[in-house]
Amino acid sequence: MTKLAVLNKVFPMRWRGSMETFMTLLIWSVACFVVGVLLWLLSDLIWHGMGQISWTFLTTAPQKAGRAGGIAPILVSTALIVGVCLATAIPLGVGTAILLVEFSPQHSLFGRLVRLSLEVLAGVPSIVFGLFGNAFFSKTLGLGFSILAGGLTLACMVLPILIRATQEGLRAVPNDYRRSAAALGLSRTATLWVLLLPAAMPGLSVGILLGLGRAIAETAALIFTSGSVDRMPESLLDSGRALSVHIFDLAMNISGGEANAYASALLLILSLMVINAIISGLAHWFRDSRIQVI
Amino acid sequence: MRQHSASLTAPRLSTVQTQNLTLHYGKKAAFKDVTLTLDPGKITTLIGPSGCGKTSFLNCLNRIVELTLNSVISGRILLEDQDIRTLNVINLRRRIGMLFQKPNPFPLSIQKNIEFPLRHHGIKSQRRIDEIIENSLQQVGLWQEVKDRLKTPALSLSGGQQQRLCLARALALDPEILLMDEPCSALDPISSEIIEDLFLRLRGRYTFLVVTHNLAQAKRIGDRTALFWVQEGSGTLIEAGTTPQLFENPQHALTRAYITGKKG
Amino acid sequence: MFQWRSEVVFVGVLRGLALLSGLIVLLILFFLLQESLSFLQTIGFLRFFKDPAWHPVSREYNLLPMLWGSLLVTAGSVLLATPLGILSAVFCQYYAPAAIAQGYRRLIELLAGIPSVVYGFWGLVVLVPLIGRLHPPGPSLLAGILILSIMILPTIALVADASFTAVPPEYLRGAAALGLGRWATVSGVVLPAAKAGLMTGVILETGRAIGETMAVLMVCGNVVQVPESLFAPVRTLTANIALEMAYAVGNHRAALFVSGLVLMGLVVGLVAIAEVIHQEQIYD
């Protein structure tokens, strides 16, 4: 009763009704506004970008600094950078996650320190990764502006995402499996390979896809690590221009580059949407199959 | 390595003995000072209210309690006069089979559930493996039901069938001791009866320790029975003896109160 | 516990991998420090505030305009995105029919997944000309705030949505039993109950806003000045790094690394605060 009294004081009856109506309207219009902005952005990209995308665009080299021609070398560089990133981050991330979940007690000092440092790593801004990559991979390790340096920098960046997803996948495996495997005298390594990793696979794939999405979207960490040479790379030590860097360069530095920037941006968004769709599909499948297991 | 006898040769019967066994989780004692002998080839049933350390006691015998953090064991556990801490843990667990409260087959096929542990323990010949699979499924009376669908997921079986598969999986490793942690409590009455019959049929071939909440079951299947109780915050062994003696002529007041339903 | 040599080796390898993963943060810190050190030793931190201007080529290192730029863009976008994000989550939880709410959530997730370079590009070709028509030149603090608001809105909206889900339904039933309307329930019961979660969301979005580079680089105009109006161009710390790293050498390069160090400190500090709030919430 007292609560009602307080509320009556705060919201006097005579304008409580109109307040409710006003807020309902406001909240719906906020929602419409957000939807509107997204649709505006997407339709703008599709409207200006769709016409540019063609087979020739995908398979030819850029001309006139990207104003004309296609983006073939850029796609190859992007794929190589992301490839280097995942090839490094997956073993590192999966190994770390397995150690943290399966082979180190929850409260061990080592485990706690690694967890803490990964949390910090997840918060580091991408431009700082760029600085680090430039100082460490490009300069100290002597990789220069190269696909390898860019991919390794991205690997550091996606590592926390990958580790978190793999950990969740492993934690979702019922503890009963571990106990009954132990009761049958199975070693923990065998249990891991035969039971735990297959069961954690959906979580792991979601993690890999999330990392892939983040790597494709990244720009700031790549500008001073993989550079912006738009020729077809011949080795991992060549500089290569990622798709996102290409968009940036066309938009900022090349007058008349807008049309191809639109097409590249649309392509980037489309590939991210495909990745997102796969992730949510996997998540659904994961949930269904888990219900079946338990 | 021991021969895989299943039911072909005379089984080896072993005893387990605990001496002043105490288990702590961190600072808290799960149970204290338990001295108990499991007679070879007999079924020992372990009864008592929940939280009195029965399951923890069971988990000590094959050392899977070590999977729990902060567990500290003191006292001794002897398997055939050997301290189990001196034995290789993998071999120990092979000699001591275990069945859990909830049926927990692996998310693999029926066949793989039995085959994978066998392969892991070094049995390579497919013929030998098939033989053991058939044999152990026969022993638990599941062979007729599943022989045509060995490749289907074990999780498609009913709860009772899953529990029998888990028993077959344990038997396939040819254990000497079988630890049962309330093996029927998650099952319907009919499946539970089937499992109980199995224990009676297997009596004499293995040394059983069965934890149960069900007094009638303890009385039906037990040769010997032991009662655990919580005293001063930790589990204690109150009384152990032959089953008829414990149920008909209990020595301890708590036992009398518990079996007559006045306490617990 | 380990029975076989292979298992010992395997766990050893895992430990090595985990050690490497854990060391990355230290490596980052080490290299940022190493590159900054010459500046801090020979020139000193105070010069960032006392020098007459930012002209690294002629040894003038006043970083204040960039600090103001970062601060204003961040503050503006957080002020704008927070109410929008929270109301979005309120919409999802308490106003929208289930199907629409689900679709709306998907949409917010989609918004969260759009790369910053695409936001920046769209801002540059759509938003900046619009603002330029309203009040030239166009690339401005306002453009940065608007673009950044859209970018960080999903962060606060998703965190708020999650913390609303955690509000015990009894509270809502209690409010309904008192005859309260929807908004009265939300403002009187839900928002206070979800306070800690909302705080976490605000801190996380702030971290994201401070660290954002590409979008602000593309729409803010990047003039080194303390802006006098919303329509004046500004340069943020992050944009400054991105613009000048390509040709910076010596102390200039070191100065950029110092600003990177400051950024990292700010963001890590925010993450730590969010973590503390989160922990307290759990132990309440």
Image (cartoon, coloured by chain):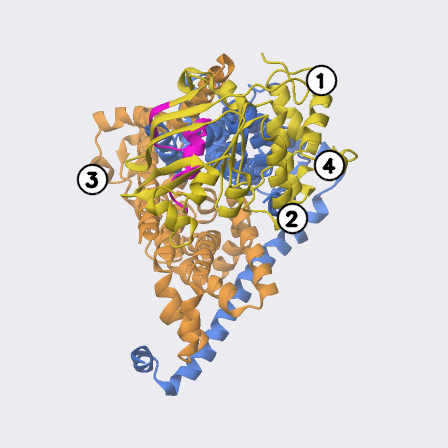
Chain colours: A blue, B yellow, C orange
Same chain, labels 3 and 4 = no
Secondary element type, mark 1:
helix
Chain for mark 4?
B
Mark sitting earlier along the chain (2/4): 4
Q: Give, as a single range, the part of the protein colored magenta.
A: B50-76
Outermost residue to the bottom: A14
Q: Which residue is mark 4?
A: B152
As shown in the figure, which amino acid type bears the numbered disc 1? Arg
Chain for mark 2?
B
**Disc 1 to disc 2, how far (Cα)?**
33 Å
Q: Which residue is mark 3?
A: C50
Instruction: Report the side of B46 relative to A75 (left or right).
Output: left
As shown in the figure, which amino acid type bears the numbered disc 2? Ile
Q: Which residue is mark 2?
A: B190
Front residue of A209/B175: it is B175
Viewport quadrant of the N terminus of chain A: bottom left
Q: Are marks 3 and 4 in contact (CB under 8 Å)?
A: no
Q: Is residue A136 magenta?
A: no
**Disc 2 to disc 3, how far (Cα)?**
86 Å
The location of residue B32, given as percent across then percent down, is 31, 34
Q: Residues within 10 Å of mark 4 (few under 14, many from 20)?
A: some
The location of residue A112, given as percent across then percent down, is 35, 32
The location of residue A292, given as percent across then percent down, is 63, 46
**Disc 2 to disc 4, how far (Cα)?**
24 Å
Same chain, labels 4 and 1 = yes
The location of residue B257, given as percent across then percent down, is 37, 50
Instruction: Report the side of A284 relative to A125 (left or right).
Output: right
